[in-house]
Image (tube, grey):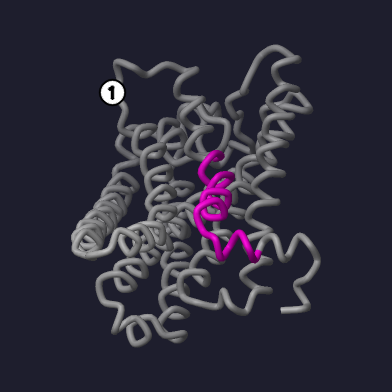
Amino acid sequence: MSNSSSISHFLLLTLADRRQLQLLHFCLFLGISLAALLGNGLVIAAVTCGHHLHSPMFFFLLNLALSDLGFICTTVPKAMHNSLWDTRDISYVGCAAQLFFFMFFVDAEFSLLTIMCYDRYVSICKPLHYGTLLGSRACAHMAAAAWASAFLNALMHTANTFSLPLCHGNVLGQFFCEIPHILKLSCSKSYLSELRLVSICAFLAFGCFVFIVFSYVQIFRTVLRIPSEQGRHKAFSTCLHHLAVVSLFLSTGTFAYLKPLSVSSPSLDLALSVLYSVVPPALNSFIYSLRNQELKAAVWTLMTGSCNKH
């Protein structure tokens, strides 16, 4: 029986046993990482450069792109390193840091998506109050609250998780450090305090989900009352990209954590973990770019080198 004080490193789950498949996974993750860096980097640069995009919606989109970059850079580089060098090791401190940043960016992402839903709700349902409710100061305060709450939540989870005595070895059943897999290594009943904290956070996340659903019910009711078809289409188009991003983020994570045990298998669990931890931050920027004409125009302007002319 070992305890946490004697553990200097953890062993992560390997993506594949065969060398050829390990190199294939490295190339796949490299491609996804480059796509995420390119997409989110272009969004950040376009919003920063394009003065006509200095609105609440694009301000929150810039924050979301920063969160996506941090999200994918937390897990993928270590997985690429392990696949390339055929290793499984991650240091104790490295695992704690990875868990902290994973929780930090996941929480920030969900908070920002909730705020962006509020932005769409006010824009469509209360357009006359948009400037008052979502002024520059209010937007800055909401973004700061999202990042600060994510930091505190990640800090509490990390401190609580790594204060637990670990009595069941150091092998994690995941390709990155994640709370449920670390709890499986803890001593009997020693993880109940962390489970209580997880339950509270799950309750708050459910509250955000209910808020998003309620907001979109109100949005759709308002849009359907618009008399002209062109007006309805324009109103829908301003929120469809956000709805797509929210659906991708929530569906992948929810199914990964709440899937029935009867359909669970190591290969499926690994595929789902890649799906919810890698795919959303890589695709979000492209979903927004494809659905938003202003952003597409700003990205094209940036890519053609005419940023300084505007």
What's the magenta region? 278-298
* 91 on left or right of 141: right
**Secondary structure of the residue carrying numbered label 1:** loop
Q: Taken as a whole, is the magenta stretch helix, strand or loop?
A: helix
Q: Which residue occupies 45% across, 24% down?
A: 269
How many numbered marks have been drawn onto this rendered protein structure?
1
Q: Which residue occupies 41% across, 37% down?
A: 252
Q: Quadrant of residue 149?
A: bottom left
x, y percent for residue 216: 26, 57
Residue occupying the far top of the picture? 18
Q: Of 183 and 34, which appears nearest the observer?
A: 34
In the rendered structure, which amino acid carries the disc numbered 1?
A: Pro
Q: Which residue occupies 52% across, 60% down?
A: 64
* 59 on left or right of 231: right
x, y percent for residue 277: 52, 40
User: Is 103 inside the magenta-drawn segment?
Assistant: no
Residue 241, above or below 149: above
x, y percent for residue 270: 51, 25
Q: Which residue is mark 1?
A: 260
Q: Of 79 and 11, which appears nearest the observer?
A: 79
